[in-house]
Amino acid sequence: MKPLRWPARSCPRRTNGQGCAPVLRAAFAIAAMAILSACEQNTFVPPPPAKVDVAVPVQRPFTRYLEATGNTAAVKNVDLVARVQGFLQSINYKDGAFVKEGTSLFTIEPETYKLKLEQAQAAESGAQASVRQTDADFKRQQELVQRQAVSQATLDNSTSARDNAQANLLQAQVNTKIAAVNFGYTNVTAPFDGVVSAHLVSVGELVGASSPTQLATIVSLDPIYVNFNVNEQDVLRIREEARRRGMTADDLRQMPVEVGLQTETGFPHEGRLDYAAATLNQSTGTLPVRGVLPNSDRALLPGFFVRVRVPVDQVQNALLVPDAALGSDQAGRYLLVVNGENVVEQRKVRVGPLEGGLRVIEEGLKPEDRVITAGLLRAIPGQKVDPQLKTIEAPPASAK
């Protein structure tokens, strides 16, 4: 390579006396950089594997539940009606009050029916006197016939009079009972413990004139029913599980039922199964089922929509992972796991319900699998990662 030479005639004059030295130094620097750039080779250094948090699934017992939506219903719900005709004399309760069995609720003009009862009792007393008289006459005529003092016809007449008097006494006794029943109907009482609705008639109103008049409604609240439906697949699964465990129909009726209101967390109300229909509803493919629950605090009212669950069986070593570790695509739910070579794999899984803040994995996961729990956006299936082993900490279990 020939040395660079600056033409003397092209070198600018410098007033400071330095001549062309600075320009030559710059030219040498540019030439050196060009030579070094031509000698360098471009090399790609791959980034380190992404760091992700991994954890093995939690193993613990898990109860599998049958969950449904149901509604509550009163065990007893009766319309209180006027069974005798008369004017309403008094209302003896406050609308919406809780009353005990036998509490007087309405009074319907009792004086008339009391007089009818006394009239029937007087007729019964007269019939009893007639029976005593005819019976004495029969015995006397019977003795006279034995002594042949009177004819047989006289005895027959006495016997007929005695039998007729006994029949009249029986009729009088029946009339007395009817009058007593009607007199009892003038006082409408609570047939059981419950809450009475607002009265539907007013004091002084004529009731029971042509047909029984509804006065109010009484509803029992403790215990209370919960009605729900079970689909055909769940019915088959429960029957198979019951057959495997040797459970009878009576055992199934004693299975616990847990209920929660729409505004409640968990299932705080507990009872037991009470009834299951003998046939499925063909139009819906479901089996009507009913549970009964104690309700002493009256937290449940008839007509509520409630969440219902029934424990079906228990898995001893269920696998659970954080719900945030799950992903979804068109094929369903999946987890990202790290294999023995620290390569990310996408694992299709079948999920169960949430249990204590963790999601139950029913199929597709092994106890030794390392599940990616954090850094999911940096984990790409088929690429290596730098796994950081962590421990899954379950949140506090939700209320029952």
Image: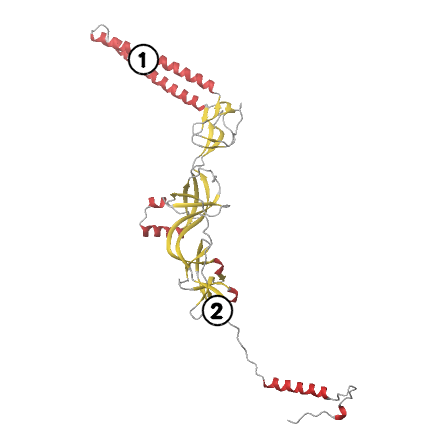
Depth check: give the residue in front, 115 or 398: 398
Q: Which residue is mark 1?
A: 131
Image spot of residue 352 (x, y percent): 43, 56
Q: Vertical placement of 107 versus 280: above or below?
A: above
Which label sits in the foreground, 2 or 1? 2
Q: Residue at x 38, y 50 (%)?
A: 312
Q: Amino acid at mark 1?
A: Val
Q: How is the image coloured?
A: secondary structure
Q: Which residue is mark 2?
A: 386
Q: Residue at x 45, y 40 (%)?
A: 73
Q: Please tell me how crowded label 1 is: few (under 14), some (14-19), or many (20+) other residues with Cα within 10 Å.
A: many
Q: Residue at x 43, y 50 (%)?
A: 67
Q: Please tell me how crowded label 2 is: few (under 14), some (14-19), or many (20+) other residues with Cα within 10 Å.
A: some
Pointer 2 or 1: first along the chain: 1
Can the viewer see residue 83 in this picture? no
User: What SS does tag 2 mark?
Assistant: strand
